[in-house]
Amino acid sequence: MTEKATFAAGCFWGVEAAFRKVDGVTKTTVGYTGGKKTNPTYEEVCTDRTGHAEAVLVEYDPLKISYEKLLDVFWNKHDPTTPNRQGPDVGSQYRSSIFYHTSEQRDAALSSKKRLEESGRHGRKRIVTEIAPATEFYPAEEYHQMYYEKHDLTTCRIC
């Protein structure tokens, strides 16, 4: 039986690629969540007016990988101190967010965020990652799914 986790950490292509490499992850889907528009398109999300974040829905086998380990992948994949921005990508659709599916995920996310803040890893910068309940997840258009694999990329050359 698999469980679900949802993370937003900037452009979803790189985030998806990072999670796809993790043993115990059975499926990833890039898409949009956390906004107000029903079934948004990429073009609509890019206007920064729908409220959605580019996110990755991760399906995983909890017998092979824990949710806490997925949180480690998330924290190590991006800069959680930059509000509404990752690298050259700017807008609320690129925000750092953990969308929890259960109260256990919420508690684990809050604990891991606190540990990261206390670690000093980011100096005096504040961790701006939002931790919010998972809402409707809308899969992105097919050409966004497994983008790196489809284009034989290891990193984003657009950014």
Image: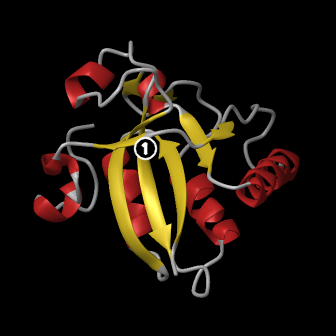
The image shows residue 124, relative to residue 139, as above or below, that is: above
Q: Which x, y percent locates residue 134?
A: 57, 43
Q: Between residues 50 and 130, which one lies in front from this camera angle?
A: 50
In the displayed image of the protein, which residue is found farthest to the bottom?
Answer: 63
Q: Between residues 110 and 36, which one lies in front from this camera angle?
A: 36
Kind of element beneath mark 1: strand
Q: Name the image colouring.
A: secondary structure
**What residue appears at the point 36 percent right and 40 percent down from the top-left corner?**
11
Is disc 1 surrounded by few (<14), some (14 to 19) or many (20+) residues within 10 Å?
many
Q: Between residues 124 and 110, which one lies in front from this camera angle?
A: 110
Q: Which x, y percent locates residue 146?
A: 23, 60
**What residue appears at the point 38 percent right and 12 percent down from the top-left corner?**
49
Query: What amino acid is at disc 1?
Result: Ala
**What residue appears at the point 51 percent right and 31 percent down from the top-left corner?**
34
Q: Which x, y percent locates residue 150?
A: 12, 61
**What residue appears at the point 66 percent right and 37 percent down from the top-left corner?**
132
Q: How many marks?
A: 1
The image shows residue 35, relative to residue 120, as above or below, that is: above
In the displayed image of the protein, which residue is found farthest to the right?
Answer: 118
Tell me: 113 left or right of 136. Answer: right
Give the labeled residue for mark 1: 55
The image shows residue 2, relative to residue 115, as above or below, that is: below
Q: Between residues 107 and 126, which one lies in front from this camera angle?
A: 107
Residue 152: quadrant of the picture: bottom left
The image shows residue 24, relative to residue 15, as above or below, that is: below
Residue 66: quadrant of the picture: bottom right
User: Which corner quadrant holds the C terminus?
Assistant: top left
Q: Which x, y percent locates residue 98?
A: 61, 45
